[in-house]
Image (cartoon, rainbow, N blue to C red):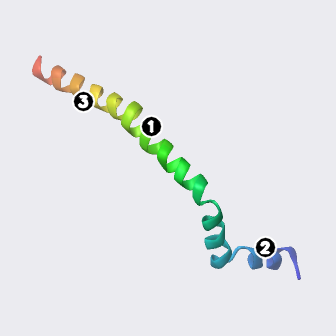
Amino acid sequence: MSDDEQTAARWTVKSELRAVGRDKPLLLALAAILCLYCAFIAGPIVYAVLAINGIADFFK
């Protein structure tokens, strides 16, 4: 078997689904971090930018 065939044999849909199952706690932790980031950091920044743009439009 060549290296390409061995790599193709390892990368199957079934093996990928098993890997996702094993990594579920990691994926949940990453999802929680993303949600907290959006809620407490990115959200207020976007809100502030939109508010500043609204105020800028008001003073035109």
* Structural distance between the alpha carbons of marks 1 and 2: 36 Å
Q: Which residue is mark 3?
A: 50
Q: Residue at x 66, y 67 (%)?
A: 19
Q: Which residue is mark 2?
A: 7
Sequence-earlier tag: 1 or 2? 2
* Image position of 1 (left or right of 22): right
When the figure is inspected, residue 18 is found, relative to residue 33, above or below; the finding is: below
Q: Residue at x 53, y 53 (%)?
A: 28
> Which residue type does callout 2 highlight?
Thr
The answer to whether the residues at label 2 and label 3 have Cβ atoms under 8 Å apart is no
Q: Which residue is mark 1?
A: 37
Q: Residue at x 23, y 22 (%)?
A: 52
Sequence-earlier tag: 2 or 3? 2
**Residue 50 point in image, percent of width and height:** 24, 30
When the figure is inspected, residue 7 is found, relative to residue 26, above or below; the finding is: below
**Residue 42 point in image, percent of width and height:** 39, 34
Secondary structure beneath label 2: helix
* Image position of 1 (left or right of 28): right
Secondary structure beneath label 3: helix
When the figure is inspected, residue 30 is found, relative to residue 42, above or below; the finding is: below
> Which residue type does callout 3 highlight?
Leu
Could you tell me how many numbered marks the image carries?
A: 3
Sequence-earlier tag: 3 or 1? 1
